[in-house]
Amino acid sequence: MTKQKGKIIAGVLAPHPPHLVYGENPPQNEPRSECGWEELRWAYERCRKSVLALKPDVLLVHSPHWMTVVGHHVLGLPHFKGISVDPIFPHLFRYSYDLKVDVELSLAIAEAGKQKGLITQVMKNPDFRVDYGTICALHLMNPAWDIPIVSISSNNSPYYFSNEVGQEQMLQLGDATREAIEKSGKRAVLLASNSLSHRHFTTEAEIPEDMSKEHIYHHGQYLWDMQILKLMREGKAKELLAVCPEFFDMASAEVKAGALAWMLGALGIPDYPATVHGYGSVIGTGNAVVEWRAPEVRL
Ligand SMILES: [Fe+2]
């Protein structure tokens, strides 16, 4: 019997401020909070409900905090366990993770990327510490951790070459990811672990979750975020990608690291509207939880 063709059933812009995990107080995270950043945490709740109802076989995440200088890397062992600590906010995020990798799909993506002329590598160090951008996005989408994952690094090409070269490579990586998923026969959800505008405060409130101190860093940055979200909501991914290189520079946008372009590329540069589940700031940065679901995908 031939294997059924796999499919990307949803793509999510899944920001990873550790504050959101801190605000939830899951047992895996050591620090305790009173509350905080509800707009975004409740946006994740809505998105989680929508996406998990589709019963995905695998969650794929592309994170800017696993930075690789040479090529695009994937986790290549079935199991990783350890403590992930945010280097900037160690008082908010010290998270014990225990995750299962879909190694078959990871290797297939690395191979498909290689076929397209990309440099790809497979991480096989059992003591490798998984970054907080990967952990936070995965936790917020699926706190039960009962779905295998694929973790992909952010190659530094947008920083070493140019925004345009970087974005072009991420689109190719997206194509490779889609091809590998289709061959796998699996139902996959893609998580682009990125904030939008990324200028932030350099000092923290005495109580980190004191929401009377939380707001967007400045109005110009907010206007950029609104323009980007408008394009997403109107289903204009092509126009969005065209404006992204300028957005990276004007708003220090974290999507520069490539996760959004990777996901849009894998989704075939969608022309259908995305659902914005919510928007909010974290230490002044702009963050949105946004879901793309192909119109033909039904429950
Ligand atoms: Fe980040």
Image (tube, rainbow, N blue to C red):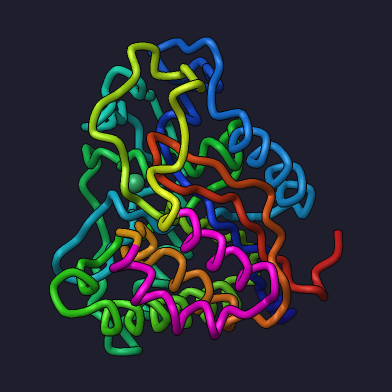
Task: Give the answer, above or below, for where 4 lies relative to 242.
Answer: above
Residue 92 is left or right of residue 210, and the answer is left
**Would residue 150 be visible to someone looking at this image?**
no
Image quarter (top left, top right, bottom left or bottom right) of the C terminus: bottom right
**Would residue 69 be visible to someone looking at this image?**
yes
User: Where residue 47 sits in the image (x, y, percent)?
Assistant: 69, 47
Task: Give the answer, above or below, for where 251 lies relative to 40.
Answer: below
Q: State the residue lying farthest toward the bottom.
A: 116
User: Where residue 126 sits in the image (x, y, percent)?
Assistant: 24, 41
Q: Nearer the viewer, residue 266 or 217?
A: 217
Judge whether residue 19 is colored magenta: no
Q: Residue at x 50, y 60 (%)?
A: 223
What is the tally of numbered marks visible in this picture? 0
Task: Give the answer, above or below, for where 144 lies relative to 31.
Answer: below
Which secondary structure class fits the magenta region best? Answer: helix
Q: Residue at x 31, y 63 (%)?
A: 257
Judge whether residue 249 is colored magenta: yes
Image-quadrant location for residue 56: bottom right
Residue 69 is left or right of residue 245, and the answer is left
Q: State the residue lying farthest toward the front.
A: 219
Q: Nearer the viewer, residue 239 or 118?
A: 239
Image-quadrant location for residue 39: top right
Image quarter (top left, top right, bottom left or bottom right) of the N terminus: bottom right
User: Where residue 41 sits in the image (x, y, percent)?
Assistant: 60, 33
Image-quadrant location for residue 232: bottom right
Q: Residue at x 59, y 32 (%)?
A: 143
Q: Residue at x 56, y 50 (%)?
A: 288
User: Where residue 77 sits in the image (x, y, percent)?
Assistant: 34, 50
**Magenta extent:** 222-250
